[in-house]
Image (tube, coloured by chain):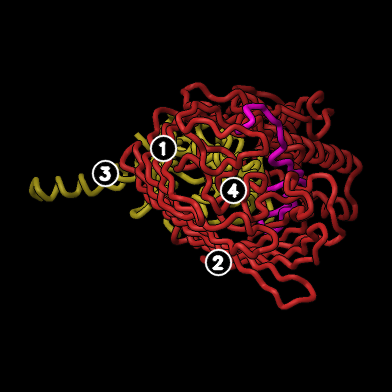
Chain colours: A yellow, B red
Amino acid sequence: MNNTIRLTIIIGSFLPALLSADDLAVVVNKSNPVETVTKAQLQKMVLGEQASWATGKKVSVVLRSPGQPERDGVLRSICGMSEDDFNQHLMHANFNGDTGGAPKALSSGVAVRQLVMSIPGAIGFLQQSDVNDTVKVISVDGVAAGKPGYKVKTGK
Amino acid sequence: MKTKSIREDVRPFITGTHDLRQLSARLGAEVSLRRGIKGNNAARLLLLFPLFLTGMSAQPSDEAARASVVVSGTAAGVAQAKDSTIEQLLKRITEMEVAQKRMQDKLDGLPAETVATPPAAVPPAGATAAAAATQTAESGQADRADVAEPSHTLGPVEFHGFSDFGYGRSWFEKRPPGGLNGSPHSFNIGDFDLFTNTRISEHWSIVGEMLVTSDFTNNFGIEMDRLLFSYKPSDYFNISFGKFNTALGYYPNAFHRARYFQTATSRPIMYSDEDNGGILPVHSIGITATGKIPSGVLGLHWVAELANGRSSSDPEAPIQNFVDEGNGKAVNLALYARPERLRGFQTGFSVYHDTMHPANFRAIDQDIYTGHVVYVGSKLEFLNEASLVRHAIQGTNQVFRSVTGYSQLSYAFGKTRPFVRYDYQNVPASDPVFGLAGRVSGPSLGIYRHLSNYVVLKLQYGLFGQRGLSSANDLQAQLAFAF
């Protein structure tokens, strides 16, 4: 086996991990029967335009605090918005009478996971290292986190 | 995974099919290894239950566990000791359900993100509370004092505000009797708009918008622009009671009175307030219901409204806040679409009907047909709306039709957004209700500049022609802000 082949194998082994390192896992409460959502649905949930799941449970979106890469990633990759854009949107939605749609903001990934674990209708976004079996990871547009084509990425 | 395997081991125990010694030996060994405790079988059994309870708290599917317990409760020959254990487990599950309900209530009670505050690295106060509450829930140690609290407590109530400061003279402010004509080079303060949107309970909320305004009299006045008590059980049905902006088109319910959100310095002529000479009933007092229609990618929504309608006997008080001059009610039905794949696009139409009763005149049937096609993206904004107002005098063949509408186009280049708008309104002079409004039309163009978070500056020039009058131009500057 020459060096080129070895290098190809090494790169091939690590490339998926490198590519998926910035994937954000979308997690829901384990009682939620949903297995996959579309990016459009995620956008509606984050922007407060979809207030309930198909089961009737109220959607509770849980994000990280402003300035955290998970939050920036959600806003960028799902909503196509900056933090300022998002604040404008929330203020405008609030002014138009929408209530309860604004996401909760928590200071750590552990807190996000704990809240998602506790609330039946909660949905959150976690670095894959923060995921454990107390929450359920769902796919986006049928693609699981870590797989090619996954669309929910962490910010910088 | 460890928790799951322990649960599997415990399941035969609670279903009465276990080998107690074997089970306790296995679990006791696991616990002893994990915690560095080497005890006898009794000690292992003592460790078994907390371990099981920990497993329960980490596994939200309590229904399945409870179902297993119920099944075990009906099994014949279950020992009394096991019954006692089952009772304890059921009690514990019930406590956990209460704790979960408490968590949901706490979450519902958390304030939404502080939307009017510039982004900061510091987490909102609500976030800290949520995290603390969550940690309590995960550990399964529900605070008894918290559990004893009512499911919802009022507050906190947040007020936001909008206002503006301008230079020039607004074309669309009607000059009241005795008011000053004044200089077109006037400094002026706009509406001081205090606004709250507060949840009362899981499904109930209140929206209040109060204005402190000044006009050509140079006096202040206070008016309630919106007051809505809303019940919102689902995405498909929301109902509100109070004073609201009639769902005739897009603009009034997208921007309301806050000039901060509007690209131009003021509303289109089409949506001028009733007491400023507007011909549409932009305010209503009554009931409004709305919701989504299951329609897939079309994103259809419905609106139905029942309201007092507009006064036709007192032009100085056209909005019937407290008493309706007639028994009949105005009805408005609207349908609009927000296609999922074309975010920012919205199109729809509405049909409004009322019967007006001018003093010393026959009753007049009023029908208003309004359509809109708008696109509001992060850069491009393209608004198009038009209404046909039809007045038919009852008992005669006399029908009068008025048209009003506008088209507005803007595009953002970074923080600067140039815009242009064309307004058109034509009311026949013979119209028995709005004949004096006449025809007004003309272009406006200007620049909107985002100065900083929640502060915008606008410069606008307008050239308007009015039937029977010479055309006039207007230059306005406006500093609008939110707080």
As measured in the structure, the alpha-carbon distance from the residue carrying label 1 to the one carrying label 2 is 46 Å
Which SS class for mark 2?
A: helix
Determine the residue positioned at 67% across, 54% down.
Answer: B281
Q: Residues within 10 Å of mark 3 (few under 14, many from 20)?
A: few
Q: Which residue is mark 4?
A: B272
Which chain hosts label 1?
B
Q: Residues within 10 Å of mark 1 (few under 14, many from 20)?
A: some
Report the disc number at residue B475.
1
Q: Closest to the observer: B52 or B379?
A: B379
Q: Closest to the observer: B417 or B188?
A: B188
Which SS class for mark 3?
A: helix
- The kind of secondary structure the magenta stretch mainly shows is strand
Q: Earlier in the sequence, mark 4 or mark 1?
A: 4
Which chain hosts label 2?
B
Which chain hosts label 4?
B
Q: Amino acid at mark 2?
A: Gly
As measured in the structure, the alpha-carbon distance from the residue carrying label 4 to the one carrying label 1 is 19 Å
The answer to whether residue B231 is visible is no
Quadrant of residue B396 in the image?
bottom right
Q: Earlier in the sequence, mark 1 or mark 2?
A: 2
Report the disc number at residue A14.
3
